[in-house]
Each structure stands twice: as C-alpha cells, then as structure tokens.
Amino acid sequence: MERTTETTNEIKVKWRCPSNIAIVKYWGKKDVQIPCNSSLSLTLNNSFTEVEVSLSEKTTMEAVELNYYFEGELNEKFGKRVADYLADNMEDFPYLRVSAVNINSTNSFPHSAGIASSASAFGAIALAMLDLTYILEEKEIDDEFYQKASRLARLGSGSACRSIFPAFALWGENDKVEGSSNDFAIEVETVHPIFRNMRDAILIIEDEPKKVSSTVGHGLMNEHPYAKQRFEQANKRTAELVQILKEGDFDAFIQICESEALTLHAMMMTSVDYYLLVKPGTLTAIEKLMNFRLEHLVPVCFTLDAGPNVHVLYPEKYAEQVEEFIKTELTDTYKKVIFDHEGQGPQKLNV
Ligand code: DP6
C-alpha cells in the first residue's frame, strides 16, 4: 500500500540510546568524521537519551524543517546542529523532502551533570530517523539496520557510533581487528566474565559546561607535535585491549585504561593552543583511588572523558567494596555520583 502524506504524518517512533565511556580514546579526526585512530568503549546503561520523533506537514520551503525540543523546550542551538546534520544526510532520510520533523529529546542524567550527551543524543536521533525510513520503505529492522544507524550516528558525533552496540564497541580501522571500520562501530563479541556487567561510578567533580568542545579538541590534533605517535599508540592499544577483554586480564586492562585517560589530557595540555580540563578534585580522587587499590588489592581503575569528571571502573563482584569506598573516602572530591554499569545497547520504545 502506498502511503499518502497524511498517513506518513501519523508515524511516530521513540528510541532510547545509552552513552558510552571510551577506554581507548578517539582524539583526532579527518575528512567527514573519520577517526585518526581506532577506539574502544564500554556502553552504559543508566545514562541515556530518549527521543520521540514524529513527522508533520511542511510549512516552509526550508530543505529541512525541524522542531527540536530538549526537555520540553525549543532548543535552537542544538536544533541547528541537528538540522545541518539531517540536511547533509538527506538521501538516508528521503521523507524530509516532504515532511517536517519534530524531535522531543530527554536525558536520564541531570542537565548540569557535565556528562557528554552528544553520543547518546546522536545515537538516538540516528536510530529514530533511520527507523522512519525503514517503516516507510516497509523494511524489517535487522543487523544491517544497526550498522547503518552506527554510520549515521558517527556523522553526527564520532563517539555516538559506539553507543549503538551493547557492552564493548570498537570503532576505527585497525589491521589487527577483523571487521573493524572507520565508517561504523562493531561489537567486541568475546568478553571474559570478569568484564561482564562492569561497573562505572561517574564522579561529577564539576558541573559547568566544558570550556573547550571536543570538536575543537579534535581539531588541535591536526597540528599536534605528538600526533603520529599518539595515533599509533591508540591503534596498538585497541588491538591489545581486544585480547585483554577475551582473556580476562584485569591488571592489563587497568594499565591501558588509566594511561589512556592521562594521555588524552596530556594531548590537551601539549597542543599548540594548550588547555587544561582537570580540576583539583579530579587529581585527589585519582590519587585516593590508586592508594585504595594498592592497600586493598581491589581491581579498580579510573578513566576520564574530555572534562574533569572521574569514571571509576570495577568488576561487578567488587561493587560493594568499591562503592563503600566511594561513599566514604571520596565524598569531598565530587558534587554527585552516578552509579552506572554495562548496558545492552539501544532500545525501541512504545509510543
Ligand atoms: C574524549 O565524539 O564528542 O570522549 O565527533 O566532534 O562529536 P565529535 O567528538 P566526540 O569526541 C569524544 C571524545 C572523547 C573520547 C571518546 O569518546 O573516544
């Protein structure tokens, strides 16, 4: 049955997409969102974006007519970024030629938490928009759908492509990892039980918006004096981490994870236009955590994203011990803590 504009405009979809935390970091990109090195991340569960997307009749001559609401309010700034993204990818969303699109987006984490939301937001937008294409073309959601969604998410925000897959996801061509690609992420399938349902306690050290966006930070890698060595190191570590996840070597995991966090921030501090995102609380939390590990021989480690917040990673079976430590010894370092863990990837929700 051919759909009329009227029936098209009755379609509504809703998707939830989680955030992810990189263990090996993506830092530096070229051309159209092509990473300079491969990266590998843990998909989260409790930190997610939900988008509800509906179509309506176009009222303007704009190539893309988008109304973007974030938590009930029209958000023109992010809406403009999304509209430009949709305009660049019209062939994947052909209905945009005849319909206006309305996006209502919400995050599970507080607005001021300082958690990067572009990964979960672009993940959810790509899934919902592609789902509309599939519905209109009467196609079933299959593995290819998720691969396409990952590619489309990447075009919105690089790290978003990894959020499409559960548990551990890898993005970026790596000659030691079969099936790896610069275009989309893949799931790391063989994972030892020690890494299953891994915990991530996110210590919110500061809740102000970032002073330097990740996009600007990536740009600084173009002229960076250590860029070549950094990209080689990240590719080597990605391949090593795939093995480590398979074999269950938590000590080796700790070493790569913490060094990646410090290397990411070292890159920021040594760019031609240098900058600093860590805060005193970041360093105190890291130091206390390292001492706790030494003293109690508990497998726990930290990572950082492009900001001052500390992600504390630990196996599920040490949750009680580590969480007790976080709630007693670290309280003066953070404003808030979000307890999260390995997630099963995105979900289509009922509307
Ligand atoms: C430090 O994916 O936010 O979190 O592609 O410009 O949107 P854009 O950048 P983004 O960069 C993420 C950087 C990082 C490391 C990582 O997630 O791998």
Image (cartoon, grey):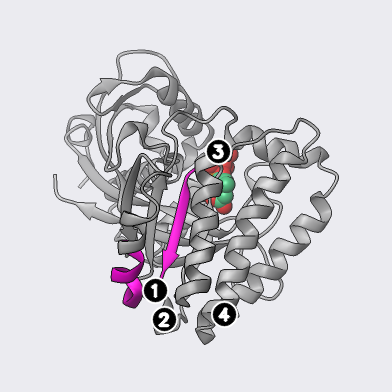
State the residue at coordinates (50%, 40%): 156
Depth check: give the residue in front, 188 or 273: 273
Q: Which mark is residue 244?
A: 4
- Residue 322 is one of the magenta-drawn residues: yes
How many neighbours does mark 1 have within 10 angstroms: few (below 14), some (14-19), or many (20 or more)?
A: many
Q: Which mark is residue 226?
A: none
Q: Please identify, in this view, whether the residue under mark 3 or under mark 4 is nearer the observer.
A: 3
Query: Looking at the picture, which amino acid does disc 2 mark?
Result: Ile
Q: Earlier in the sequence, mark 4 or mark 2?
A: 2
Q: Earlier in the sequence, mark 2 or mark 3?
A: 2
Q: Earlier in the sequence, mark 1 or mark 2?
A: 2
Q: Is residue 94 above or below residue 166?
A: above
Place residue 242 in its image quadrant.
bottom right
Please say whether residue 182 is visible from this viewpoint: no
The CA span between labels 3 and 4 is 31 Å
State the residue at coordinates (65%, 42%): 32
Query: Looking at the picture, which amino acid does disc 1 mark?
Result: Pro
The CA span between labels 1 and 3 is 27 Å
Q: Which residues are magenta?
A: 309-323
Q: Which corner quadrant of the figure contains ligand 1?
A: top right
Q: Which mark is residue 194?
A: 2
Q: Please identify, in this view, whether the residue under mark 1 or under mark 4 is nearer the observer.
A: 1
State the residue at coordinates (65%, 32%): 216
Depth check: give the residue in front, 315 or 37: 315
**Circle 1 is placed at which residue position?**
315
